[in-house]
Amino acid sequence: MKTLIKHATVVLPDETLVTNVLLDRGKIATVDAAEHAAADEVVSARGLHLIPGVIDTHVHFREPGLTHKEDLHAGSLACAKGGVTTFLEMPNTKPPTTTVARICEKLDLAARKCVVNYGFYIAATPHNIEELKAAEQTPGIKIFIGSSTGDLLVDDQESLERIFAETTLPICAHCEDETTVRANARRLGGGKTVADHSRIRDEAAAVIATRRAIDLAQRHNHRFHVLHVSTAAELPLIAAAAPLVTAEVCPHHLFFNADDYDRLGTRVQMNPSVKTAADNAALWQGLEDGMLAMVVTDHAPHTVQEKNVNYPTSPSGLPAVENSLALMLNEVSQGRIALQQVIRWMCDGPARVWGIQRKGKILAGFDADVVLVDLNKSERIADNSQVTKCKWSPWQGVTLTGWPVRTWVAGQCVMVNGNLDDRIRGSAASFARAP
């Protein structure tokens, strides 16, 4: 099928211009199509911006094992609504994705259920080194260096040394020092209110674990990515280890801090925890300065009933994938950042860091994963309109200006003005490996 997108303001890698883009057989055929080029569908996009599809390389879609919170189909629909055309999903499902066979099972599930493109990390354990060495159809290895993730906790130095020394896939890690977290919890009697969460999972817990992981990466010359950076203090460590080490930030660490517990309670309870307003400002600056390569969500939904129990029984995690692009476009509409920066942080950066082929840019020959956005559209986020299976958002009641209005995956239109076509199916992302 050929689609001609006419008169769009197209954000290309080196310039932004009003032009016509032709999508043909799943690819971007040309970015300067003739006004009357033959096409099966013509879309008038005057006054709208065409950008690459967002790539969210950090989501938890809960399948298998926890599908009452989210599943691959609902999660992928939320992606399409939010302008996300490719996701990479974390391995802490039930059972966890710790073997090549389980990666294959997830890929098979996704092929049947997902309306956008997909990929799945493999999880490290202290005992699965041979599986990590054999894995191929995956972006990389996920390590929980300090977490409350049961069997996936890899905290002993010998196991970490082996993983960094003997494997070749890129490694990413949840960096919170378990010893520090447990000591803080004991000191605070386990925590009395949700505000204690940021005292238990404090700056020191993040910095100690991040420093430890970067040391491993440098000594073994192993590509490493720091997940969901939450503190200003981690940024110099990351900058000093570049380009071997890269890092990401999530919307909740950009927009929320410990002052928001009074207003939002456990809705903003996350691991790593939200920190301070000063950390918010430093993380934005880290994006501006290039120390942080991307903005991804760590979309990690729980039901409202689960989140509403008293701390510390309440689980950590929040949904964000269908609102993340709009949150950043709202910053554009407010004049705080440029649209080109959003694309660098949400499209090109994730593709570049994880070697995702033919995605993240609007270029002839690239996959036709593109999104039309209306920078003037204002809309209020409401729990009851969320596509995510958990049906709530920490941004409930917030009005944002700048929204995706049409999403294509491999040239197939999967979303128009919030209306979704769940007959579309995405495909598995492919990953370039460093020589």
Image: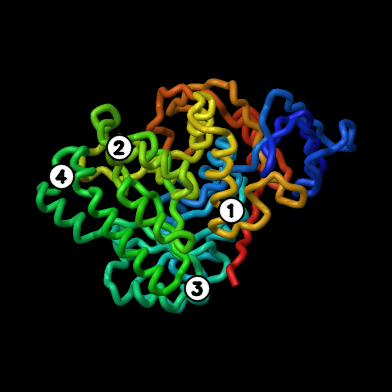
| Residue labelled with disc 2 | 278
Kind of residue at badge 4: Gly
Q: Compare marks 3 and 1 and give the one earlier in the sequence.
A: 3
For residue 403, above or below residue 354: above
Amino acid at dot 1: Ala
Secondary structure at numbered mark 1: helix
User: Would you call the spot at circle 2 few (<14 residues within 10 Å), some (14-19), or many (20 or more)?
Assistant: few
Give the image location of residue 195, x and y in percent: 20, 38
The residue positioned 22% from the left and 45% from the top of the image is: 313
Report the front residue among 408 and 95.
408
Which of the pair 113/12 is nearer the observer? 12
Which residue occupies the foreground of this view, 420 or 172?
Answer: 172
In what element is the residue under mark 2?
Answer: helix
Classify mark 3: helix, strand or loop.
loop
Identify the residue under disc 3: 168
Q: Nearer the viewer, mark 2 or mark 4?
A: 2
Identify residue type, mark 3.
Thr
Q: Counting residues from the N terminus, which is met first, the one under dot 2 or under dot 4?
A: 4
Q: Where residue 351 is drawn, which disc sits there?
A: 1
CA gap between label 3 and label 4 equals 40 Å
Q: Earlier in the sequence, mark 3 or mark 4?
A: 3
Q: CA distance from mark 3 to mark 1?
A: 19 Å
Nearest-to-viewer mark from 2 and 1: 2
Q: In this view of the protein, can residue 69 be seen by the observer? A: no
* Pair 3/2: label in front: 2
Residue holding disc 4:
191
